[in-house]
Image (tube, grey):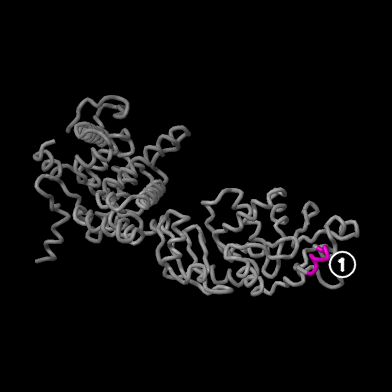
Amino acid sequence: VLDSGARLQPIRPPWGSTRVTSANLPPTRQPDEHLVRALVHDLDTGFVELFQAYRHVVFSTALRISGRWADAEDLTAESFLRAYRALSGYRRTRILALRPRSWLLTITLNLWRNHERDAARQPRCEPWEQGLDHAPDPPDPRADVERTVARRETDRELAALLTALPAEQRAAVVLRHVVDLPIAEIAEILGRPEGTVKSDISRGLRLARALLEPPPAANSDPLTSKPTEVRV
Amino acid sequence: MTPADDWFLAEHDPLIAGLAALAIDGPLGLLERIAASWVRVPGPVCDLYVASTDRGVVYVRTSDAVHDDAAEFAALFHHRFTRPLLAGAHPPAELPPALHADRPTGIRFDLDELSAFEREVLLAVLTIPRGQVRPYAWVADQIGAPAAIGAIDTVLLQNPVPVLIPCHRVIHADGTVGDHVFGPPVKRALLDAEGTNLGEVYELAQQDVHYLASETTGVVCFPTCPNARGSRHGFRSVAEAEVAGYHPCPACRPTSTEAG
């Protein structure tokens, strides 16, 4: 009975009342209380727990906003290092009041923006080809080979698609639909009003759709010309 | 977006499902880029606590210096480095051989948090072989800063990786050992453990002899250099030895600009 239930999960994601939940991310609301207490008790061992609890969220965000494996590793390592530096200067009460996930992702997003700003001053090479082709995909023991191959193609296509979105839309879409955060938390992380975040997400999705299914008209480039027909 | 939209999107929209599938586990090895790890290994005078990052050895204390207390080692580490320190399972492979080799070959150091000057000083000191000593002026000369003897003394007293980068092999020109991260007695003990003939260096210095030239090898050396062997002549300066027909030894590299 348990086994069949587990097998059903990837087909029917167990979402809450209204929100879609990514099937491959463990629930992250509960352990925060335990984590901040562990950090207060012993910063170094608590930090390892923090890293284990949130490395997938931070790395997923970093990989999908940057589009490059090496950049994602740098961003993730630097985010956690900055987090540790900040924590070592925080008082107990401040650590206990932390919401680690949004705090960590705020650091990651700030680092990424700074990185992009610096990179914009230097000539860029093509955005995603090198790193992502060598990127290992998440292992999925349930999938058979054919499905895995098909999924990898889709993943690569979608990952490339994300890097074509404007920065703010990309960040909002990644936080909402890749790492599955609620709108309020995304607004906090990006430092933007919820309304703006929602409109960034829907505009980002609309553009992504247009890029996925280009209108039949010849030679139309959805990035530069306005798509004639869009689905939301 | 209404809840109904959300439901519709998830159930029927390959884009939303595809984006959700892009979440990926962070590589476990990333922790090594963030945290340092420490081990305790047998050292020449007493045990050593050694902290390493993924780039190399970053911090060393003797067990005496931390009262053989891992927590005290961690406190000293954190005073200097703002990164997590975890207990390591085993020492880096190149560490035990480096402690016994003539020169620490193959061992990597993480000196990223030091200034360019500090790194230069320490890398120059790293080339001094076991069993030998050099005056502070030699280090100054090696890094092309002959006037920086005082600054070099300060850098060596703050050497984050003593013993492995052998700052104990740098002594005063008058043959006295001078100060050390762990104090002069430990410095002397480290040199004794390496079989350094400190007594001879001191006696020669008292006679104003800082270099020995060898008739066997035809070169002028620091007294502890193995090339200063056979029939030897003492000199106050390299310049005087050069006048007498000797060449500066290519191994221990004495130079005429040294203050002596």
On screen, residue B167 versus residue B79, left or right, reads: right
Residue A149 appearing in the image: no
**Residue B241 higher or lower than B93, as above or below:** above
On screen, residue B36 versus residue A216, left or right, reads: right
Are there few (<14), some (14-19), or many (20+) residues within 10 Å of tag 1? some
State the residue position of label 1: B233
Residue B187 appearing in the image: yes
Between A29 and A86, the one lying in front of the other is A86
Q: In the structure shown, which secondary structural element does the residue marked by tag 1 occupy?
A: strand
Between B153 and B230, the one lying in front of the other is B153
Residue B193: % across, % down: 64, 75
Quadrant where the image shows the C terminus of chain A: top left
Residue B26: % across, % down: 33, 54
Residue B153 sits inside the magenta stretch:
no
Quadrant where the image shows the N terminus of chain A: bottom left
**Residue A121 higher or lower than A101, as above or below:** above
On screen, residue A31 versus residue B225, left or right, reads: left
Residue B119: % across, % down: 59, 53
Residue type of the residue flagged with mark 1: His
Tag count: 1
Q: Residue at x 34, y 44 (%)?
A: A108
Residue range (magenta):
B203-209
Residue B207 sits inside the magenta stretch:
yes
Residue B40: % across, % down: 47, 71
On screen, residue B144 versus residue A10, left or right, reads: right
Q: Residue at x 24, y 29 (%)?
A: A216
